[in-house]
Amino acid sequence: MKKVGIITFHWAPNYGAVLQAYALQKHLERFDIFVEDINYLPLRNILTLRFFDLYLRRFENIKKAKVMRKFRNKYLQLSPKIYFNNKGLFESQNKYDYVVAGSDQIWNESFMMTAEKNVTLSYYLNFMLDNNKRISYAASFGTNEITANIEKYGIPELKRFKAVSVREENAVAMLKSYGIDAYFVCDPTLLIPVENYEYIIQNKKDNGTVNIFNYLLRGGRESSDLTEKYIIQEACKDMSHLDKKILSVEDWLWKIKTCDLVLTDSFHCTVFAILFHKTFIAINDKNCSMNARIQTLCKRLGLEHRILESYDQNRINGLLKTTDINWEEVDRKIKEWSKESTDFLLNALEIKEKP
């Protein structure tokens, strides 16, 4: 049995971060692979975030971190040893047949330059001295361009990878310009059947459903703020909507599954709206530097018409009235994309698919 370590943002207080980590583990386990998340907790970065949460009295962030920790402890297989910095990760280099970097925005410049005071290349797998063990799956830069710092520090490490895959089409082109062949694959959350997520909420006790699941991450943007206000106060004023309290991961999935409409600017919330066959409006602000993810997802699944790029009442009304999505065709495209992505992953890991 091959042993695979995954290094990702499993520690992030974010629904998408923990669910994509869960999905990649569950998917690889189907092929008789021993898999665990390398329990890398960049201590300086995490303590800095916690300090500012306390200093600024952002108690909802502290509560959310507790919720995510509970999910990780229940559903993720983590390495027994915790690694608090990049230096410590070098101890793990001989423990795995392969290490997979991804998914999520693990290659973003902000983490690389600030997480451990000095430049840290943990998610570029600099601690794996055997290049043939380095693989990325659906990794993301979280931006539409290769910055000077990524070019200087990250690209040389990526050139040492055995196989590279990313979750945005534009990243394939960006890496190609540096002589790196990258594959375009789906996010891990699309690799496993929806039944895996329904298993998580199968014993969920209903503590109330909402008609509108309005989950917005980027407040302060006209596209998000005005759209949410218009839908709740004018277009759908008689429908219940999500309040701002912190939900467990199970509650988060449950409310998406049981609502009538999903309104979001979150990539992973959009993914789960699609997986649960929900009518959705994906706000993808045309001025946002991180908008490639939702655009790529919807384009591949033939759902571009569900994207809202700016506040437009007529467009919103049209999206609210148009609810007839061909889910059979969407599921077919997900299955096809998942198969292509699985082929890449198994080939990189030198594993034959079970008959």
Image: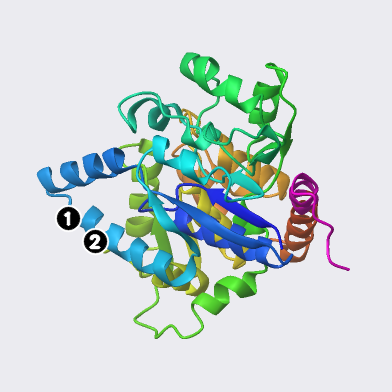
Within the image, what quadrant is residue 94 found in? top right
Looking at the picture, how far across and down is residue 300, in whole percent?
A: 72, 45
Judge by depth and name the residue closer to the eye, 340 or 314. 340
* Secondary structure at numbered mark 1: helix
Label 2 residue SS? helix
Residue under the point 67% across and 61% down: 28
Q: Residue 8 bears which disc, if any? A: none
Q: Is residue 51 above or below residue 288?
A: below
What's under tag 2, amino acid-wise? Lys
Residue 218 visible in the snapshot = yes
> Which residue occupies 43% across, 83% down?
204
> In the drawing, what numbered circle is on residue 59?
1
Most extreme residue toward the right is: 355
Mark 1: give few (<14), some (14-19) or many (20+) Cα within 10 Å: few
Q: Quadrant of residue 156?
A: top right
- Left or right of 105? Residue 347 is right
Q: Is residue 257 above or below residue 114?
A: below
Q: Which residues are magenta?
A: 341-355
Q: Judge by depth and name the residue closer to the eye, 114 or 221.
A: 114
Q: Residues within 10 Å of mark 2 (few under 14, many from 20)?
A: some
Horizontal arrangement in the rendering, residue 30 relative to residue 223 (left or right): right
Q: Which residue is mark 2?
A: 63
